[in-house]
Image (spheres, rainbow, N blue to C red):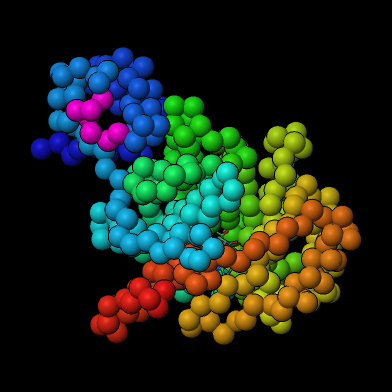
Amino acid sequence: MIKKKNLLGCSLESLEDFFRSLEEPSFRAKQLLKWIHQKGIIDFDKMTDFNKLLRAKLKEVAYIKPPLIEESYLSPEGTKKYLIKLDSGTMIEMVRIPEKKRATLCISSQAGCALQCTFCATGAQGFEKNLTSDEIIGQLWLANFGDDEKTPITNVVFMGMGEPLLNFNPVIESAKIMKDQMGYGLSRKRITISTSGIVPQIDNIPNNVDVSLAISLHAPNNKLRDEIVPINKKYPIEKLIKSCKDYISFYDGKRNITIEYILIDGINDSKDLAYDLCKLLSGLSCKINLIPFNPFDGSNYKRSSMTNIQSFKEVLVKKGFITTLRVTRGDAIDGACGQLVGKLKKSIKGKNLIDAREI
Ligand code: SAH
Ligand code: SF4
């Protein structure tokens, strides 16, 4: 028996190959992409511009199946967190953050993460699996068509569970569908890949897809970064900054990188480190996003005080860096990714069922 193919995670190019293999014209690929990602239709029988014969042929070799929303939790500020069940039974998370006319979706690229940054709830769980492109784009599909929210998703950030650049091909394939005019039609500015700094794969992005890049820096020197972002031992700061510069040069200097910097009390939030950060980033076309640490069960870190956050920010602004402070929303629903699944796993281990009120 042939193994059927899930077409949800196929980019235009892959669908063209697929239709060619069925000896069908390649324009079918555009039609199918539109049905799935613009109209939210995943039943071949409802695709009215496909004749009966073609539908029967498609059903024989393929199917279209998104993952499942297992639970969703709404915070008082409107942030919505989803627990999503994959076919394998694995749970992942995604978060929807609404703003006036926009809605940003924070999606996962892996279940768990092998990189073990010391401040991260996903890292604390270890690595479970790489998501397929169906499972990645399936999150965006679900947020647009599988839930009762009205505002469509206007921005996507790969800032959920996992390191996107360690699951390179499926991440690129799904980003292509996000960008495609027959898919979600999101511009490059509205799709952000966030990475802890997998240098060879940063170098690989521009040859594959044009999206926005965010670097999770969190420390301005190797000693501290080795400690809190252990992958730094493999790809130290000098190599990372060089790779960022090459990335910008690839686009003739017409790109800006986002530098993410978590503020953890007493660890990386001193004024001296703010000055070091300015030195490190001078000459790099970037903006800085400060993220107050989101505490979670089992972590000894604390969020920096508002006074320290403000004085850290002041140093950067005075030195001329465009600096934003991420408003922490969704604390009540464990806003930082990995926390919900972490809690679920703990409660299963302890044999109590998860209590939604606790979340
Ligand atoms: N692995 C990628 C993308 C997922 S993490 C990366 O590290 O960039 C997305 C962002 O969430 C990163 O900037 C990460 O540092 C941040 N993050 C992780 N744990 C956090 C926490 N407890 N509080 C605030 N931000 C956190
Ligand atoms: Fe992995 Fe990113 Fe969490 Fe680090 S911060 S453990 S790279 S998900």
User: Where in the image, quadrant-wise, is ligand 1 located?
Assistant: bottom right
Q: Residue 43 in magenta?
A: yes
Front residue (pair 12, 307)? 307
Where residue 74 sits: x, y (%)? 44, 63
Return the residue found at the far top: 25
Check the image and report above or below for 196 versus 58.
below
For image coordinates 71% across by 82% down, the residue present is 266
Residue 70 shown left or right of residue 165 in the figure: left
Where residue 251 sits: x, y (%)? 70, 34
Where residue 253 sits: x, y (%)? 77, 37
For image coordinates 77% across by 57% down, the residue present is 323
Check the image and report above or below for 64 versus 44.
below
Magenta segment range? 41-47
For image coordinates 75% across by 50% down, the residue present is 286
Return the residue found at the far left: 1
Front residue (pair 41, 13)? 41
Q: Quadrant of residue 301?
A: bottom right
Can residue 38 be seen in this snapshot? yes
Q: Residue 108 in magenta?
A: no
Can residue 113 be seen in this snapshot? no
For image coordinates 63% across by 47% down, the residue present is 213
Quarter the N terminus occupies: top left
Q: Quadrant of residue 18?
A: top left
Where residue 291 sits: x, y (%)? 65, 65
Residue 286 shown left or right of residue 346 in the figure: right
Q: Quadrant of residue 205?
A: top right
Front residue (pair 172, 105)? 105
Quarter the C terminus occupies: bottom left
Check the image and report above or below for 276 versus 53.
below
